[in-house]
Image (spheres, grey):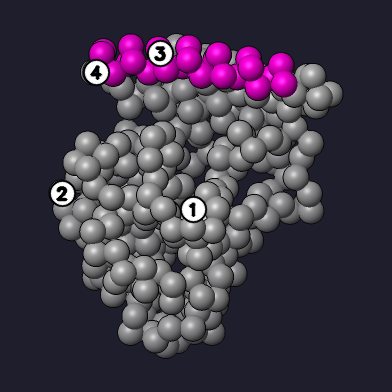
C-alpha cells in the first residue's frame, strides 16, 4: 500500500485542491492511504481538511497534528503514522495528475530494487508566466523538475525534490529519518533535509529512480518569482549546507571547494547570457551564487538573511 503524506503549514488556499487531486485518482481506495500532517497551522487549513473529509468519506484518511514545528518533524511524524510500505510525499501546494497513483503503483512493482524515487514537477505560475530572469539553471529553486520522458536513475548531484518524492519503508529503516536540524520552520528558508537523506542513500548505493509519468503541478505564487526570493533562497541554501556540515570540518571544506567550482560555472553562464542580451538571467545567477556563498560563510543557524 502507498502512504501518501501531505505535510502542511498555512496553505489553506491550496490544501483542499491538493487532497482532492489525490482522492480523484483512478485507483482502488485500498491501494493507498492519505495522511495530512498539520504542522501548527494558524489559518483555515483545518476547516478545509474537514471539508475534504466530508466530500470524500471513503478515502482512507488520517489527519494528524504535529506540534513540533518544522517540516522535518512533520515528515517524520507522517512516516511514524503511516501503514504502507512506500512513503509518498506531495507538497501542500502541488496537484497530482489523475493517473499519478496508478503509474506509481506500477513502477514500484516494476523496479523492486528502487529504494527512492522522484517524479516530474511542472510549474504552475499564479502570475500566468515565467519571470524573464528565470533560466533553467534556477528552476530548482522553485521546486520544479523535468528530466525528460524516460525512466532513469538520479546520478551525480541531482536528487528528487520534496514536492514529489518517495521512499520504500525498508529504505527509511536503514538510512534513518529526516534530519530535524534541517528543513523549513514556519517562514525561514532553511532547507537541505532532502539532500541530506538522499546523500545517506547514495552512501549505501541505493537506487534512486526518476519516473516521468508520476507528475505533479506545483503552484508558484508571485512572491517566489522575485529577485528578492532568489537572494533569500540562496542565503538559506548556504546556511543549510553549513548546518549539514556541522561537526564535520572536512565535509565543510569540501563544500567550500565545490562552491568555488560553482562560481566558475556561474561566471561562464553569466557571460553567455550577457552576450545574448539576457541581462536579467545573468544578474539572477550571480545574485543566487553570491547569497549561497554568504550563507555558507555565515554564522547564522537559520535561513533568514
Question: Tag 2 or tag 4, which sits nearer the N-term?
Answer: 2
* Left or right of 57 on screen, residue 64: left
Which mark identifies residue 163? Answer: 1
- The residue that label 4 is drawn on is 248
- Mark 1 or mark 2, which is nearer the start of the sequence? 1
Q: Residue furthest right?
A: 277
**Residue at the image point whose x is 18% and y is 58% from the top:** 170
**One can see residue 30 in this view:** yes
Labels 3 and 1: the sequence-earlier one = 1
Whether 84 is drawn above or below 77: the answer is below
Real-space Cα separation, disc 3 to disc 2, in angstroms: 29 Å
The residue range painted magenta reads: 249-272
Crowdedness near tag 2: few (<14), some (14–19) or many (≥20) residues, C-alpha within 10 Å? few
Above or below — where is 29 with respect to 127? below
In this view of the protein, which residue sits in the foreground, 101 or 21? 101
* Disc 2/disc 1 C-alpha distance (Å): 23 Å
Label 3 and label 1: CA atoms lie apart by 28 Å
Name the residue that disc number 3 marks: 256
Tell whether position 280 is magenta: no
- Percent x, y for residue 60? 36, 80
Q: Residue at x 55, y 76 (%)?
A: 98
Q: Are marks 2 and 1 in contact (CB under 8 Å)?
A: no
Q: Which secondary structure, mark 2?
A: helix
> Badges 3 and 1: C-beta atoms under 8 Å apart?
no
Amino acid at each position: 500500500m502507498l502512504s501518501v503524506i501531505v505535510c502542511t503549514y498555512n496553505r489553506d488556499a491550496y490544501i483542499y485542491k491538493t487532497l482532492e487531486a489525490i482522492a480523484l485518482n483512478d485507483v482502488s481506495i485500498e491501494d493507498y492511504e492519505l495522511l495530512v500532517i498539520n504542522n501548527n497551522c494558524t489559518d483555515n487549513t483545518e476547516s478545509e481538511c474537514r471539508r475534504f473529509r466530508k466530500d470524500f468519506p471513503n478515502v482512507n484518511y488520517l489527519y494528524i497534528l504535529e506540534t513540533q514545528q518544522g517540516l522535518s518533524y512533520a515528515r517524520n511524524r507522517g512516516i511514524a503514522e503511516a501503514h504502507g510500505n512506500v512513503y509518498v510525499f506531495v507538497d501542500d501546494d502541488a496537484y497530482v495528475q489523475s493517473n499519478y497513483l496508478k503509474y506509481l503503483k506500477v513502477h514500484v512493482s516494476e523496479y523492486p530494487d528502487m529504494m527512492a524515487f522522484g517524479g516530474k514537477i511542472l510549474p504552475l505560475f499564479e502570475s500566468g508566466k515565467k519571470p524573464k530572469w528565470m533560466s533553467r539553471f534556477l528552476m530548482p529553486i522553485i521546486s520544479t523538475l523535468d528530466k525528460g520522458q524516460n525512466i532513469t536513475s538520479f546520478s551525480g548531484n541531482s536528487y528528487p525534490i520534496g514536492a514529489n518524492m518517495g521512499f520504500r519503508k525498508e529504505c527509511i529503516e536503514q538510512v534513518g529519518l529526516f534530519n530535524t536540524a534541517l528543513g523549513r520552520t514556519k517562514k525561514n528558508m532553511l532547507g537541505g533535509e532532502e539532500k541530506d537523506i538522499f546523500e545517506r542513500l547514495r552512501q549505501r548505493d541505493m537506487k534512486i529512480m526518476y519516473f516521468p509519468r508520476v507528475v505533479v503541478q506545483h503552484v508558484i505564487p508571485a512572491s517566489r518569482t522575485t529577485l528578492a526570493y532568489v537572494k533569500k533562497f540562496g542565503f538559506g541554501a548556504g546556511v543549510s549546507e553549513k548546518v549539514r556540515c556541522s561537526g564535520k570540518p572536512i565535509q565543510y571544506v569540501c563544500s567550500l571547494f565545490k562552491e568555488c567550482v560553482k562560481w566558475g560555472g556561474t561566471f561562464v553562464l553569466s557571460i553567455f547570457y550577457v552576450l545574448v542580451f539576457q541581462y536579467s538571467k545573468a544578474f539572477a545567477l550571480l545574485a543566487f551564487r553570491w547569497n549561497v556563498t554568504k550563507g555558507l560563510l555565515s554564522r547564522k543557524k537559520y535561513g533568514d538573511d
